[in-house]
Image: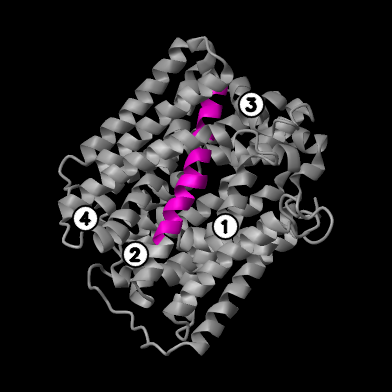
Amino acid sequence: MGITLLTFLLYTGFVALYASWQLRRDEVNTQDGYFLGGRSLTGIVIAGSLLLTNISTEHLVGMNGSAYRNGAIIVAWEVTSALALIVGALYFAPRYLKMGLTTIPEFLEKRFDGLTRTLVALLLIVSFVATLLPIVLYTGALNIEAIFGISELLDVSVEEGIIVTVVIVGVIGAVYAIFGGLKMVAYTDTLNGFGLVAAGLLVPLLALLSIGDGDPLEGLRTVFRHAPEKFNVISDEPGIGPGARSAILPFEVLFTGLVINQLYFWTMHQSIIQRVLGAVSLKEAQKGLLLTGLFKILIPLIIVLPGLIGFYYYGESLYDNPDSVYPLLVKRVLPLWLTGFFVAVMMGAVFSTFNSTLNSAATVFSLGIYKRYINRDAGELRLVTIGKWTSALLALFAIGIAPFVANAPDGLYQLLQQLNGIFFIPIASVIIAGFLFPRVSATGAKAGLLFGLVFYVVMDYGLEVPLHFVHIWGIEFVLNLIVMHLVSHWGSKEPTFIMADAGLLDLQPWKYAKGFSIFLVLLTLFLYLSLGNV
């Protein structure tokens, strides 16, 4: 335990000191400096930060748990992200940076009106506090408890140990977000992100070396022969009718609601796209997005393969508790001196997603709600102060809610995705309509937003229709667009939106952007063709 704690403290301290040193000359008391890192982020920093903002313990624990129970079909959440990132790099990033946006709701005010911006801002903040932040904290605490045995060290119950860990992780993560702003988050993300890739790859590699008596390929063949059906990436689960509601990820949903979800998350979600808005140029933004796309295709080696190896080791003995598979595997295969480093980067992943979300929520509230409705004359220093207080309060709410997400029936990652559907699809439909359909009015946008919220809750939680929840997303998206067009047609006409150039950044695109995008598409197709129906 001593050497584990030492390596944990050494790496965590190094990351904190490095990020602080990088920020020594930066001005973080200005609006752009605190919320957008001074618009100075490069491609490699954007990619590292995007990777770690997205990959956290709800992936390490939740997706590996789902892979253990349901097989490799869960890779669709990751691999199809690359396609959305291509759209983000080639279509959305040039437009966001041209307008000089600080938040996504800011675009909605330019395109529609202030009330549309406010409604979306409020929905974003509620979604952060009610879904993402608590689940990230809980899964992080679950993993740390399983590896470090906090409850044994403190001589308390496991539940109490997890609560203590939630509080500690939540407080430290909030400190990063409150005092360093986006640039502190981005620098710590970059180090922890690449550390997570290295440490995450070691888990399956060491397990396969052990299984294959020193030959990892033989170990992989052994795991495959034990349960070849687990490696199939194409699910034959029903998406419609009996069994659809309990299905994990039927293959056909990849072509309906999953498309919209991925587009929203990777091209419109504030906590993700804020890194792009903080880019030093369009070229660097595109590099960051497309490099993230490559990582997302490779990341199943870290968040899916260990779950399949877990099935080889534990069989069906953990089916009732799949979220314990990954912590047990880490404890089994990692040597003590590496365990501390792994827990450090894993905790860094928790910090990243947690403090990135806090920073995004603070940005949305300070600029979209406080300055608009509470203090229109607020200066930059006042807005930064309000942002810090917002982060602190939201952190307290998330810490309070986190213990209640335990014992999700289909696993924590599945729970997160189902809850996200309440917010993601209505917001996505309004933003996409804002870009693609000039005839949609502000009144139409608000009607579509409210309709989408009610529709999903009624269909999935009220009527419990026999459809997979991702199919409901697809139907909801189409209906939202229809509602927006009908209301806009009946209402008064509005002036055509003209996208003005704010003149803040170099908008010259990366010359390899299209070629790299084609490569990512081919790589995605290869994965499905090679692992489909194995």
Query: Which circle's residue, 3 or 2, is located before the other in the chain?
Result: 2
Q: Residue at x 65, y 34 (%)?
A: 407
Cα distance between the residues tagged 4 and 3: 44 Å
Q: Quadrant of residue 42?
A: bottom left
Q: Is residue 435 visible from the viewing direction of this image?
A: no
Considering only vertical position in the picture, is 185 above or below 521? above
Tag 4 residue: 31
Tag 2 residue: 283
Tag 1 residue: 422
Residue 329 tag number:
3
Between marks 4 and 2 in the image, the one whose residue lies nearer the viewer: 4
- Could you tell me residue 414's position as x and y percent? 64, 46
Query: Which circle's residue, 4 or 2, is located before the other in the chain?
Result: 4
- Could you tell me residue 90's position as x and y percent? 44, 70
Between marks 3 and 2 in the image, the one whose residue lies nearer the viewer: 3
Query: Which circle's residue, 2 or 1, is located before the other in the chain?
Result: 2
